[in-house]
Structure formats: C-alpha cells, structure tokens
Amino acid sequence: MILNYLGILAGLSLLVYGADRFVDGAAHIARYLGMPPLLIGLTIVGMATSAPEILVGIVAALEGKTEIAIGNAIGSNIANIGLVLGLTVMLMPVTIASQTLKREFFVMVLAILLAFGLMWDQNLSHLDAVFLLVGVVAAILSVIVLSKKSAPTDPLLSEFESELPDKSPEKSNIRRSIFLFFLGLGLLLGGAYLLVECAIIVAKHFGLSDLVIGLTIIAIGTSLPELAASITAVKKNEADIAIGNVIGSNMFNMLAVIGIPGMIHATDFDSVVLHRDFPIMIGLTLLMGWMVFIRGAGKFDRAEGAILFLCFIAYQCWLFNG
C-alpha cells in the first residue's frame, strides 16, 4: 500500500510540474501566432489550467470510472474557490478592478447550470456530453466577444500583457515553447495515469467510492496548479489574473472535464451528487461572486478568504464522516 501512496504523491507532483509547463508553452505559442493577450488569458490559459482535470477524467473514463471524472470536476471547482481563493486571499487581500471578469463570471454560472440541468436525471449520457461540449464552444465564443468588448483600460489586459512575451518572439523561443507544451502534456498524461491507478487502489482499500476519491484527493491534487498560479499572481499585484484563472478553470471544468469523459464512457451516478455536491459548489460560487463583485465592490479581504477556506474544510469533513 505504501507504493500506492507514493504513486499518488508522484502523480500529483507530475500534474503540478506538467501543468505549469503546459500552460506556459500553450500561452506563448498562442502569442506567437498573434492572439491578443486578453484573449489568450481568457481562453487558452483557462482551458490549459483545466488540463490536469481533463486528462485525469479521460484516464478514469477509459477505466470505466467516469464517476471519478464527475467528482473531480465538481470537487475541483469547490477546491478552486474554497482552497485556492480562500488561502490566496488569507495570505494577501486583493482588489479586483476588471469589468471583464464580472461578465465571465456570469458565463461560468451558466456553464454550471447547464451541467446541473443535464445531469438532473442521475445519468451522464453521450447526448449530455455532446451538449456539454457544444457548451465549451459557446463559452469560448462568448469569452471572445467579451475580450473584444473589454475597455483598453481594463487592468486584466495590462496584467496579461506583462505576463506574456512580445508578439514576435525569436524562433528559439517558439521552439522552446513547443517543447514545453509537449513536455507538459506528457507529464500531465503520466501523472494522470499514475494518480488514477493508485487512487483507485487506495479507495478500494478504505472502502471509498469512486465519487468520493474524485471529490477529495484527486480534486485537491488537480487544483494545486491553480493554487500556485494564484499565489504567484497576487504576489505580482495581478489579482485580476488570480480570480480570472479560477473563473476560467471552473467554467471549463463543468463543460470539458465532464463532457469529454462522458463521451468516452456514459454512466449513472449517485444521487448524492445532485443533493450534496452540486448545491455546495453552486453555493460557494454565488458566495464568491457576492463577496468579490457585490459586497466589497472588488475588495476581497482576509476574513472573506477565511470563510471560503473554512467552508472547504467543513465540506471535506462532511465527505469523510458522512
């Protein structure tokens, strides 16, 4: 069993390290191809930060364990808000000034409601998966429109511009970016396979369901790249990027992380997903939106971060003691 624990740790390490290289490579390649920084940040980076969840979901679905993918998607969203944002803001209060993020938050909420509605019958069918993947396309198009409507003074634009290279980097740099992209992808795939295989064995040993293992160990592990990225962004006074990463990741988690595995292996799932996990995720999402965009008018303080983090801890305790 010790080897399986080590396998989980190794898988998580590969996911964290691979995700960083994958996101960096994808963003720089997109910049080299002439994409505007804001569009890269809202689409390419958003999708790339969900790559660990997507690959874990694919590996799980190929094993006939699509419920792990469902738990991973929902659990990652809960972890992104409670663990990632909660800890980040507890370390350093932030102020959000981007109007674009408010609009993207609305798109994310629609993605969550779409997934909830399609899965209300306790079944993730191939048709449901098709609708979710159509939702991915619709979300990307919506974000493209948002990026074009964003004011030139939107702070999110300047933050992404400072993070990305010039429009025409040297050929040596683009070669390095391509190398990082494929290196990251390979590490993500290896990490996902190792994590899923070892987590399934550990779950069986302790009598945990596929859903719970997806909601806990795997969800927290696949959210670690977002945690590292958010803390780094806040330290650079790029709070809008930190919030944007979470919103973008959560949106694609609901659509792609559930949709792609659903296309591979349709499945029924436990009704507790609809009565416990989805409501918790929706409640935390709305609480975050209220804290960031309404109550504080962009100001996000330590007390609010602590509330989100305590909600996350309480949820984890509920899962293991329920």
Image: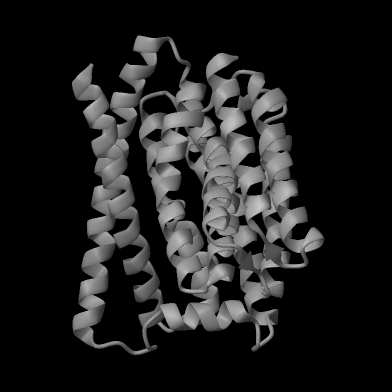
* Residue 174 placement: quadrant: bottom left
- The vertical placement of 9 against 146, above or below, is above
Q: Which residue is drawn at 51% across and 70% down?
A: 41
Q: Residue at x 34, y 25 (%)?
A: 199
* Residue 54 placement: quadrant: top left
Q: Nearer the viewer, residue 210 or 312?
A: 312
Q: Which residue is drawn at 60% across and 14% down?
A: 322
Q: What is the x, y in percent for residue 207?
A: 43, 9
Q: Which residue is drawn at 72% across and 66% down?
A: 102
Q: Nearer the viewer, residue 137 or 111?
A: 111
Q: Which of 279 and 131 is in front in this view?
A: 279
Left or right position of 144 against 8: right
Q: What is the x, y in percent for residue 84?
A: 52, 50
Quick one: quadrant of the N terminus? top left
Using the rendered image of the protein, determine whether residue 118 is visible from the camera's viewpoint.
no
Using the rendered image of the protein, determine whether residue 247 is visible from the camera's viewpoint.
yes
Left or right position of 178 against 219: left
Q: Nearer the viewer, residue 163 or 48?
A: 163
